[in-house]
């Protein structure tokens, strides 16, 4: 009897351990880990404006080393729900990490570098046609770097709907995002919440070997006119500012705010030829701010930005590599400068110019890339001395894991 009980007990323990191991295996199967690392050498050469001499001068050149590390974790809660997180490096600005850059300068006497919460959001996807997200998430719309920096993550709620056939897709996306909360002050008698709403409709179609994508969006920034700048106090990143406090000495941090409202209409798209060895793709983007008015300092409205470019991907010649070029004209008040591409002209708006890039893998999951920017800052100013040249070269080693 005792022998039988012992055998039954051992059998029960074995079954429980097997089930536990299976459960642990299932738990690990529901977690996905991903990441990337980039080492960059960067050169920046730029003109500056000498206010005392009222003339254009050559600013100091910069050479710097930068790193980027991002680590992502995806947790599958169930078949319809995921929780996505990502941590990454970033420069410390205005009490937090830079919202449009995950680069960290190698400086500060070997000081330790911060590692920030870059993403954290819930993704509910009950079917292939619909998903809803809540939290700090990647921009959920079709866009180019003209409007949003590739490193930007927005905070709020988004819904994405699509209907696909073999050769077509129609999609509808909408989101409301929280950008800032401020209490009452001398310029507002009530609490001020700033944010944005975006709605986008678009479609994709395949015709033989050609793929076409077109999207139209409306973006409304709420409570920005005559209100504090987003992210960095009194820094418009190229946007036109105005004094907004009755007592700048008492509230110096918020003494400047946006002069105009920002209600944007955006049209972007691409045309791609799916070749066997070469895949060319034309891209374009256009945005106009219906809330802007005539800028008295420039004697015109500066409310439109556009980008046009081409990308070429080459397969097995002798390896897979790609080159890209675009030209963009980023007018002063066409969009919010704090969230656009941080690289050309040092970031923000109020510039035009070129971007040329090339990249190729050198081994599995390792890529070399080179990017060159040639820009003119403040190109619409009536004073020629205010038009400042800007050059930037970035050489990268990129690793994915």
Image (cartoon, rainbow, N blue to C red):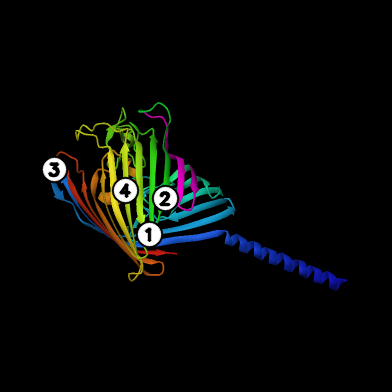
Can residue 341 be seen here? The reply is no
Mark 1 or mark 3, which has the lower sequence index?
A: 1
Mark 4 or mark 2, which has the lower sequence index?
A: 2
Judge depth for marks 4 and 2 and give the one in front. Answer: 2
Q: Estimate the spatial distance between the alpha carbons at disc 4 and disc 2, rounded to whole Å.
A: 17 Å
Asked if the residue at tag 3 contacts the one at tag 2, i.e. Cβ–Cβ closer than 8 Å, the answer is no
Query: Which element type, helix, strand or loop, lies under badge 1?
Result: loop
Label 1 environment density (alpha carbons within 10 Å; few <14, some 14–19, many ≥20): some
Where is 104 relative to 377, above or below? Answer: below
- The residue labelled by disc 3 is 384
Tell me: 352 left or right of 222.
left
- The residue labelled by disc 1 is 274
Label 4 environment density (alpha carbons within 10 Å; few <14, some 14–19, many ≥20): many
Label 3 environment density (alpha carbons within 10 Å; few <14, some 14–19, many ≥20): few
Tag on residue 205? 2
Q: Identify the image quadrant of residue 22.
A: bottom right
Judge depth for marks 1 and 3 and give the one in front. Answer: 1
Mark 3 or mark 4, which has the lower sequence index?
A: 4
Q: Position of residue 177 (x, y in %)?
A: 44, 40
Where is 134 relative to 62, above or below? Answer: above
Q: Position of residue 96 (x, y in %)?
A: 40, 47
Can residue 145 be seen here? The reply is yes
Q: Identify the image quadrant of residue 210.
A: bottom left
Residue at the location (52% across, 56% down)?
A: 74
Query: Which element type, helix, strand or loop, lies under badge 3?
Result: helix
Residue at the location (29% across, 55% down)?
A: 310
Q: Estimate the spatial distance between the alpha carbons at disc 4 and disc 1, rounded to whole Å.
A: 18 Å
Where does the magenta region start and end? 158-185
Mark 2 or mark 3, which has the lower sequence index?
A: 2
Query: Which element type, helix, strand or loop, lies under badge 2?
Result: strand
Which residue in the rendered view is the most extreme toward the right?
1
């Amino acid at each position: 009897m005792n022998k039988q009980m012992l055998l039954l007990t051992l059998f029960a323990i074995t079954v429980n351990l097997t089930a536990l191991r299976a459960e642990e295996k299932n738990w690990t199967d529901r977690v996905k880990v991903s990441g990337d690392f980039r080492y960059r050498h960067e050169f920046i050469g730029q003109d500056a404006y000498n206010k005392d001499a009222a003339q254009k001068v050559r600013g100091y050149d910069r050479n710097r080393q930068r790193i980027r590390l991002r680590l992502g974790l995806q947790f599958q809660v169930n078949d319809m729900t995921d929780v996505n997180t990502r941590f990454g490096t970033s420069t410390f600005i205005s009490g937090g990490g830079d919202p449009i850059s995950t680069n960290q300068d190698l400086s500060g006497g070997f000081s330790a570098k911060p590692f920030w919460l870059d993403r954290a959001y819930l993704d509910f996807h009950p079917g292939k046609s619909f998903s809803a997200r809540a939290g700090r998430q990647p921009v959920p719309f079709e866009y180019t770097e003209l409007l949003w920096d590739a490193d930007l993550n927005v905070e709020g709620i988004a819904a994405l709907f699509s209907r696909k056939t073999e050769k077509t897709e129609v999609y509808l996306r909408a989101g409301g995002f929280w950008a800032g909360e401020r209490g009452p002050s001398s310029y507002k008698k009530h609490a001020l919440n700033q944010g944005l709403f975006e709605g986008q409709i678009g479609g994709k179609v395949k015709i033989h070997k050609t793929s076409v994508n077109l999207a139209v969006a409306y973006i409304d920034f709420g409570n920005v006119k005559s209100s504090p700048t987003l992210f960095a106090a009194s820094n418009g990143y190229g946007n036109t500012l105005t004094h907004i406090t009755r007592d700048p000495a008492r509230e110096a941090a918020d003494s400047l705010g946006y002069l105009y409202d920002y209600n944007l209409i955006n049209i972007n798209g691409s045309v791609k030829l799916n070749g066997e060895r070469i895949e060319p793709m034309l891209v374009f983007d256009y945005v106009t701010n219906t809330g802007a008015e005539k800028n008295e300092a420039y004697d015109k409205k500066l409310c439109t930005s556009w980008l046009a470019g081409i990308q070429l991907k080459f397969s097995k010649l002798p390896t897979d590599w790609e080159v890209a070029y675009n030209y963009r004209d980023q007018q002063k008040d066409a969009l919010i400068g704090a969230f656009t591409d941080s690289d050309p002209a040092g970031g923000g708006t109020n510039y035009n110019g070129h971007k040329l890039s090339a990249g190729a893998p050198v081994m599995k999951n390792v890529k070399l890339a080179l990017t060159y920017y040639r820009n003119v800052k403040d190109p619409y100013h009536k004073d020629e001395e205010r038009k400042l040249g800007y050059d930037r070269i970035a050489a990268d080693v990129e690793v994915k894991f």
